[in-house]
Amino acid sequence: MKVKFLGAAGTVTGSSYVLTSGSGQSILIDLGMFQGLPETDALNYKPFEYDVSQLSGAVLTHAHLDHCGRLPILLPGGFNQKVYMTAPTMDLVELSLLDSAKIAKQDHKPILFDKVLAQKMFTHFETASFRAPFRVGSFEVTLRGAGHLMGAASLEIVDLAPDSAIKKIIFSGDLGNSPEDLLSDLEYLESADAVVMESTYGDRLHPKEDVETTIANEINAVSASAGTLLIPSFALERTQEILHIIMHLRKSGQIDGGIPVYMDSPMANRATQIYMKHIDMFNPHLQKEVGEGSAFGFEGLDILQRRNQSMAVQKRVGAKVIIAGSGMMVGGRIVSHAAHYLPLESTRLLIVGYQGEGTLGREILEGAREVMIDRQRVPVNATISEIKAMSSHADQDQLMDWLGHIKGIKKLILTHGEDEPRKVLARRIEQELEMNDILMPQLHDETTL
C-alpha cells in the first residue's frame, strides 16, 4: 500500500489522503478545506495533485469543513464514483457545503464551487453504518465511532490485494475529547499494521475546568454590567453543547433567567435540527433528556434567521448573550458583532474552541489590542476569556490511550497537527509505546507502507 498526503501534513486543516492498494487501485480519504493564514487559504485554489478520475471511490470521516470542504472540486476533475460516510455525516456535509458556497458568495471571496456543483456532488453520496464492512475498489472499509462530532468515524481499511505485505491500515480521523457531553464514547480498535493518526493536541493536556461554572460566571458578569457576552461558536456540535449547558444553568437557577440569549447562526439552527433527527447517536444521558423534552431549547432563546435581525440585536440595550459563527471568527455573523462590540469595555468575549494560526480568534486570544476587521482598525477593549476543556479533539493522554489499544503496528504516521505538537507526541510514543517507525509527512509526500 501507498499513502499520498494531500492535506493536513504539518497543519491542522485541508485533510486529504489517497490510499493505493497493492493491486494499484486507489481511494480518497477526506478532501478538506485549508483554513488560516492567507498562504494556507491559497492552497484551496491550486490544482488538486491527483488524477481523481482514477479513484475507485472516496470515504469521508466527518463533516467539518477541514475534512469535507473541497469535495465538489472532484467533479470537474472527472470523479464519477461514490463517496461513503455515515448518515449524520451526510446530512451535516450537505449543510456545510451549501453554507460554504453561500458565504463565499456573500463575502465576495474566490469561489471554489457554487451551489449547483455542491448539489451535483450530493448525488455521489452513499451512507454506510458503523461496524458494517463495505467494499470500495480493492479495499474493505469499516467505520468506527470517533466521537468528536455527530457521525464522525475512524476508518479501518483492509487491502484485499493478495500480495499486499501491509494488510490493515487505520485512519483515526479526528478523535473526540471522550467522554463528551452529547455523543457516545469513541471506539477502541484492536489491531492494525499501519496507523495514520491526528495530532492536533499532541503537545498538551486539556485543563480540568468546570465549564458550566465558567459559562455561568461569564453570563452573570454581563448581566450585572448590562454588557454583552459574545461566544464565537462552530455551528456543528459546539453550539449545541453551549445551548445544552445554558439550558441546564437556567433550570438550576445559576444564571439570570431573564437575560436574552441570541443564537445568531442559521446554519447552527439547521444543524440542531439534524442532531434531533439522529438522537440514536447521543449518549444515554442525552437520549434520556430528549425523551423528557428539548435538549437544546429554553425560554429566552431567540433564534435569528435573517441578517437584518442580526443587525437589530446590536441596537438593543441591556445585558445579552450572542452565540454566532464562525468559531475562529474568520467569517459569518460573529465578525460584524466583533467589530461592533470589541471596542466596548462592557463586552466579554468567550473563546470556546480551537483557534487556528492566522485567524482573528487566535490574534485576539494572543493579546492583540487592535485588530483589522473588514479593512477597519478595531480596538479590543473587551474582556477576553477562554475555555480550553471544551475542545472536541483528544488531548495527548487521550491520543496515547487510543493508540495504545491497537496491537501489531509496524508504521505510525502523524498528521493533522502543527509540526511542534506532533514532534512532542512522537517523542512520547517512542518512549512509552516503544514505536520507532514514526513518520511525519509534509504536503504532497507519498510513503510506501
Image (tube, rainbow, N blue to C red):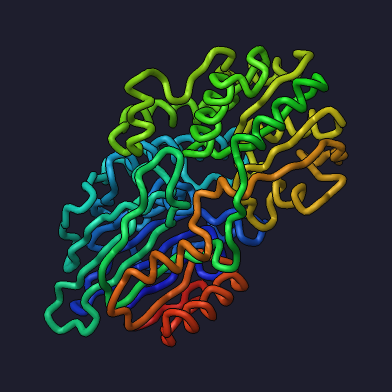
The percent coordinates of residue 5 (x first, y second) are 43, 71
Q: Residue at x 44, y 63 (%)?
A: 48
Q: Residue furthest bottom?
A: 436
Q: Is residue 32 above or below residue 375?
A: below
In the image, 102: left or right of 127? right
- For image coordinates 55% across by 33% down, the residue present is 242
Quadrant of the snapshot with the N terminus = bottom left
Q: Is residue 80 left or right of residue 375?
A: left
- Residue 253, placed above or below residue 397: above
Residue at 52% over, 39% down? 238
Q: Residue most toward the left? A: 162
Q: At which x and y percent is residue 110?
A: 59, 46
Quarter of the image with the C terminus in it: bottom left
Quarter residue 40 falls in:
bottom right
**Can see residue 75?**
no
Q: Nearer the viewer, residue 390 or 97?
A: 390
Q: Residue at x 48, y 25 (%)?
A: 269
Nearer-the-camera pick, 244 or 60 = 244
Tell me if residue 151 can be seen. yes
> In the picture provided, is 267 more to the left or to the right than 122?
right
Q: Position of residue 154 (x, y in %)?
A: 33, 58
Image-based side of 355 in relation to 177, left or right: right
Task: State the image coordinates of residue 428 (x, y, percent, origin top left).
Answer: 52, 77
In this rendered view, identify the residue nearer to me: 19 or 114: 19
**Quadrant in the rendering for residue 165:** bottom left
